[in-house]
Amino acid sequence: MLSPIILVPAILNGLLTGAVYALVALGLTLIYGVLHIINFAHGALLTAAMFGAFFAHRLLGLDPYVAALLLTPAFFVLGYALQRFIIGPASGGEDRNILLVTLGLAVVIENALLYAFRADTRTINLPYAFDVVDLGIAFLAVPRVIAFGAVIVVALVLWLIMQWTDTGKAIRAVAKEKVGAELCGIDVAHVYAVTFGLGTACLAIAACLLIPTYYVNPHAGNAFVLIAFTIVVLGGMGSVTGALIGGLFIGVVESLSGLYLGESLGQIGIFLIFILVLLFRPSGLFGART
Amino acid sequence: MNRLVRVSRRRFLQTSALGAVAATIGAPSVLRAQGAPVKLGVLHPVSGALSYSGQQGRLGAVLAIEEINAGGGIKALRGARIEAVLGDAQSTPEGGSAEVEKMNSAGVAAIVGGYGSSICLAASQTAARYDLPYMVDVGVVDAIVNRGLKNTFRFGPGFGVIAKTALDNLVTINEQVGKTAKTVMIVHEDSAFGSGLAKLLNTQLPDRGFQVLETIPHPTPTRDFNNVVLKIRAQNPDLVIPANYYNEYVLLARTMQQQRVRPKGIYSVLGGAASSYKFVKEFPEAAQYIMDCNHWFDPRNPKSAALKKKVEDKGEFYTYEVFMNYSCVLLIADAIERAAGADRPKIIAALEGSTFAGHVMPYGPTKFVNGQNQGAAPVNTQVIGNDIQVIFPAAFASAKAVFPMPRA
């Protein structure tokens, strides 16, 4: 079973799947790194974004990759508003409240989607969905290759924003030292909301990259978010590079353990790594040691 | 004009009690005169994981009721209309049972539906407490009719019959082409339905001259079938037998097409999507030449074609849930007709002796033994072009099996 005929495609597929995991994890790690909260609504927001991409195609005839140009800013605004006007005020500044508020949001969003669209699973059929890139040793699905490229670009852009813009610097300042940042005149509530908005915008892009090859129902996002949590822990809280490398790594691990242990047990590999990282390197591969 | 009449509490109670008694005594004559509607419970999982199938099932049942009413209702009851009492099992057995309780309180004469095996098991058990006739529309687990419940009837075939027919037909199809297929891989979902079927196939396929190379289980939902397809490619079996629900079935077929894995045949037993017009319309290339052994209407029956047109005119797909439920309601209506009333034991007796042939399935007249319709049998279909053709039984096949499938 170690023949390269299946091993190489399995690893390549793992990398391509891992890229999308990485993007979902990017959003999560940003929010975690800056707001120090676990955003339980991440999965539900991803599902909402997938419905957005689905209906943009179904009703407006927009290609998902074009829809990303509209959905990304829309979800940035949505994320900003959620944090600024709901999560922030409702939590009263206590982290454990935020946890519950995001959990509540997840329940509300999922059930609203269930009510509006029923549990029916939907897919869209794109002419290029079945196209493959023939590498000789493996066929790679075109939408996945596009997704891989897009994730790299998004990660790069995000890294540049964080590194070189004033907003990025403010976000990093708030992440490191909230009170200090506030004393320097940084509007912490605004920075929080911007970060949440960026995290949510990542989901919109992930949704548009997923929808050509995946399906959407009101619970579709959850599957990705559990894995994204593992990636955040593996890569290090708040680390963009960590999320990217962690995502790709987890993708390969999932693919290989699926191949050798069977699909039913495929996720064991992921959670074994989760436990090992927590035991031996709790700060993650790229996390700052505190 | 309005004069206030003072009525004491006691007086009021006395008169209303008298009135009630009078109404009860007078009821039969009133019924005969007006043909009071007969209530029929229509139970489906219209929300939750099985909602698509549940909604399709409800559609079939409601269409049949509309047709009966438009055709003059129940003649033995002077044209009494059938009134549907709709219920949502919420895709859970408990949800199904709760709805049966409600329907019983509403005074239904019988219940049709259930769809999922687990829902059918629970709902019919609850109905049995009230001697309430229960017609299972789809649920294939054989325990449904093996429990000795007098109220429970199943119009369609069970698991055992389906698996046997599927294997018999597979052997025949294979022999017609000189036993070209020898090796098999089974891909199944890992709950009761898929695992049970995989186990059955693993014991029976070797006896029929097939070698099972590998059996791959996967959870529901599964997001990615690339690994499964890679394994299929590595083993290169002649036949792939998938046993999973709609979404996974579609994903597997699409991934096989994408990775250019083309076995000699894809042959499913109760395939989640294999004989669904929805699948064929949405992914015609991935569905091409897939064979399935599943519930299927009688294509020779003009009534069936008329129903198909009616459903498609509504913009819906003519799936097995629709025609199974449509047939079940007609069957129940026939029993109510012969029982000449909504009396439950009489309806059960009428079903026991039922020889109803007005349905759209290729079963012949109904004949129930211990609640199971003896003539019920699945049909083999194959996706050819943009349509689903019957390839077996020969009596009403609309096409010859394309096997092995041509290399694209």
Image: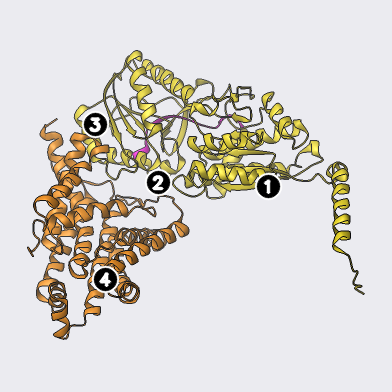
Chain colours: A orange, B yellow
Q: Chain of mark 3?
A: B
Question: Disc 1 designates what residue?
Answer: B106
Q: Are marks 3 and 2 in contact (CB under 8 Å)?
A: no
Mark 1 or mark 2: which comes first in sequence?
A: 1
Q: In the rendering, at what x and y percent does residue A20 appear?
A: 22, 55
Q: Which mark is residue B282?
A: 2
Q: Chain of mark 1?
A: B
Q: Amino acid at mark 4?
A: Gly
Residue drawn at x 18%, y 54% as measured from the top left: A231
Is A125 inside the magenta-drawn segment? Answer: no
Furthest residue in direction front, as rendered: B10
- Label 4: state its secondary structure: helix
Extreme residue in the left direction: A289
Q: Which residue is mark 4?
A: A197
The three-letter code of the residue at mark 3 reads Ile
Instruction: Determine contact: label 1, label 3, CB under 8 Å.
Output: no
What amino acid is found at the position of numbered circle 2 in the picture?
Answer: Glu
Q: Is disc 4 in the same subunit as disc 1?
A: no
Residue B299 among those drawn in magenta = yes
Residue B232 is labelled as 3
Q: CA distance from mark 3 to mark 4?
A: 43 Å
- Give coordinates of residue B303: x percent, y percent: 63, 35
Q: Nearer the viewer, mark 4 or mark 1?
A: 1
Circle 3 Cα neighbour tier, 10 Å, few/some/many (<14 / 14–19 / ≥20): many
Identify the subunit bearing mark 2: B
Q: What count of labels does the image hold? A: 4
* Alpha carbon distance from label 4 to label 1: 51 Å
Query: Three-letter amino acid code at disc 1?
Result: Ala
* In the image, residue A77 above or below residue B120: below
Judged by depth in the image, the label closer to the viewer, 2 or 4, is 4
Q: Which residues are magenta?
A: B285-301
Q: Is residue A133 visible?
A: no
